[in-house]
Amino acid sequence: MNILDQLKDIVELPTIPTTLVRVLRVVQSEDTDAKDLAKVVYVDQALAAKILKVANSALYSLPRKVNDIERAVALLGFNEVRDLSLSISVFDSLYLPTGGAYWNRAKFWEHCFVVAYLTRELARNMGLEGGNAFSAGLLHDLGKLIQDRYFPIVFRQIIERVDAEQLRFIDIETALFGTDHGVIGGYLLGLWNLPDELVAGVSNHHHPVEETEKIATAVYCANELAHIGGFSVLPSEPDGVLEEFYASPTTVALQEAGRLPGEAILANALVKLDENAEELSAQAAMLL
């Protein structure tokens, strides 16, 4: 039985967060405004506080500090706040703040936050909606949280082999699980009936050539650039190298298909990451 079949048998898989249901209902209605969305978010004070922190981060570079959700909705837009609510609610429903030393969850969150930032930057140059890109980037490794929570023994074996053999996480997990964390995370998001574009971006961020949705390519590039920029989760996992990224079969296939962002776009994203690295790290830490 593969891991997806096992997930189907887990009765305590989390349901879609209540706050997110309310947010989506408001956003999808034609008769709502910023005040309506703000009221829904305000009900969840922890979520409201995190959204304000993100709104005031380097992700958005707003001209002045935002102190209330209604103002954040007005400045960022319905879809942006919707996607921030989605991402944060999903993480809060699965995130385990404590655990063994083998798995540094703070570094994991930092990595996801950086990938969200980079995905958003790349999406702007690929004609994609920034908010959806942010969500896909933040949730791209959701499957690792599912592995950690529901299959801790095998998950620890993966971590230990990464440490011992200094191979990439995805190579070992595919051998042990028969699939990768992207597919696992996309499976849960699909159960929650979340947007197809978001599910595709998460499911195929390691296999963007097989996916028609551009968001998968954006997340793939963002994830690779995060590793190149030093934002890996495991210290023993090999850091990315730009030359190896361009030489990889996946990147070459995307380039041949005309789907890879230009070198100038990718280089600029790395420059922005370097310039905002400390700010992004501090912001990620505040959101835990």
Image: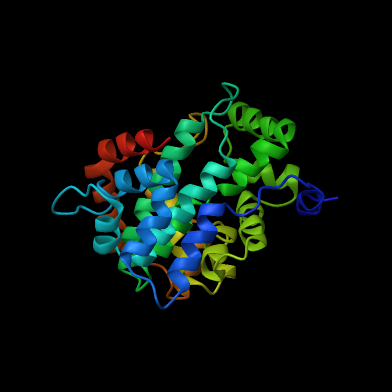
Q: Image check: 157 left or right of 272?
A: right
| Residue 147 position (above or below residue 30) | above
Q: Is residue 244 visible?
A: no
Q: Residue at x 57, y 44 (%)?
A: 93
The residue sitting at the top extreme is 101
Q: Residue at x 24, y 47 (%)?
A: 56
Q: Quadrant of residue 208?
A: bottom right
Residue closest to the eye, 99 or 125: 99
The residue sitting at the left extreme is 63
- Residue 223 in percent (x, y) is at 45, 51
- Residue 19 in percent (x, y) is at 51, 53
The residue sitting at the bottom extreme is 30
Q: Residue at x 31, y 59 (%)?
A: 121
| Residue 195 position (above or below residue 244) | below
- Residue 120 in percent (x, y) is at 35, 59
- Residue 66 in percent (x, y) is at 21, 49
Quadrant containing the C terminus is top left
Rendered image coloring scheme: rainbow
Marker count (numbered): 0
Residue closest to the eye, 228 or 144: 144
Residue closest to the eye, 274 or 280: 280
Q: Residue at x 75, y 50 (%)?
A: 178
Q: Image check: 77 left or right of 7?
A: left
Q: Is residue 254 visible?
A: yes
